[in-house]
C-alpha cells in the first residue's frame, strides 16, 4: 500500500535528474477540484467487479479500483509540477500544469513512523523526510510526473 511517484527534469529522461516521492500515508489526487483517486481505494475491488472477484479480492494484487484509476491517470500526457507546498506539519500539495493536485497528508503523530520521503537519483540519496529532519522546500518546482 505504498505509492512511489517518479519525477524528472525532462519527461523523456528516465535516469538522470530523477526525484521520487515515496508515500506511506494518506494521499488523494484531484483533477479540476474533483477527487480522482485516494489511498483507500487500494482496498476496494475495481468498478464493475463480479461477485466472484469481490469475494476473492486481494488488495495486494493489481485488481483494485485504485489500480484501474491510476493507470488511466498516468496514461495522460506528462504533467509538470508548477508549485509544491510543504506544510510545517508535514502535509504536501503538488499543483500540476493540467489542474491536477496531488495531496499527501500525514496520518500519524509518531515521529518514528515515516510518512513520506523524497528520493533523488537513487534510494540512498534521500532529500527529506518529515521525521528526524527539518522540513524544507527543497522539492523543485517545474519537474514532470
Image (tube, rainbow, N blue to C red):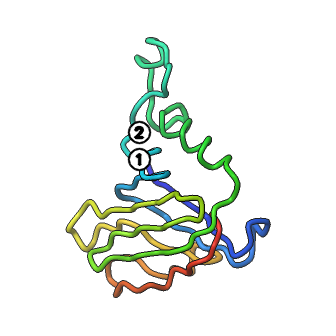
Q: Kindly check if marks 1 and 2 are in contact, taking CB atoms under 8 A apart as contact.
A: yes
13 vs 138, left or right, is right
Vertical order, 22 against 88 (above or below):
above
The residue wearing badge 2 is 41
Q: CA distance from mark 1 to mark 2?
A: 6 Å
**Quarter in which the C terminus is drawn:** bottom right
x and y, in percent, of residue 6 in the image: 61, 64
- Specify the farthest residue to the right: 12
- Viewed as shown, does residue 19 lie left or right of 53? right
Front-most of 138 and 84? 84
Q: Which residue reaches farthest top?
A: 51
- Judge from the rendering whether residue 111 lies leftward or rightward of residue 40; answer left or right: left
Residue bearing the label numbered 1: 38
Q: Residue at x 63, y 61 (%)?
A: 79
Q: Name the foreground residue: 88 vs 124.
A: 88
What residue is at 56 percent from the left and 73 percent from the top?
A: 82
> Which element type, helix, strand or loop, lies under badge 2?
helix
Q: Residue drawn at (63%, 49%), measured in percent from left and top?
A: 74
Number of numbered callouts drawn: 2
Amino acid at each position: 500500500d505504498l505509492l512511489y511517484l517518479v519525477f524528472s527534469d525532462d519527461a523523456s529522461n528516465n535516469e538522470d535528474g530523477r526525484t521520487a516521492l515515496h508515500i506511506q500515508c494518506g494521499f488523494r489526487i484531484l483533477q479540476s477540484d474533483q477527487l480522482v483517486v485516494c489511498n483507500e481505494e487500494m482496498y476496494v475491488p475495481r468498478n464493475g467487479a463480479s461477485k466472484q472477484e469481490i469475494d476473492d479480492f486481494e488488495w495486494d494484487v493489481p485488481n483494485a479500483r485504485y489500480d484501474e484509476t491510476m493507470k488511466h491517470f498516468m496514461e495522460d500526457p506528462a504533467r509538470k509540477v508548477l508549485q509544491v507546498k510543504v506544510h510545517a506539519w508535514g502535509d504536501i500539495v503538488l499543483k500540476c500544469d493540467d489542474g491536477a493536485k496531488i495531496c499527501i497528508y500525514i496520518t500519524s503523530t509518531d515521529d518514528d513512523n515515516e510518512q513520506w520521503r523524497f528520493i533523488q537519483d537513487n534510494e540512498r540519496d534521500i532529500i527529506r523526510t518529515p521525521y528526524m529532519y527539518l522540513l524544507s522546500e527543497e522539492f523543485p518546482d517545474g519537474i514532470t510526473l
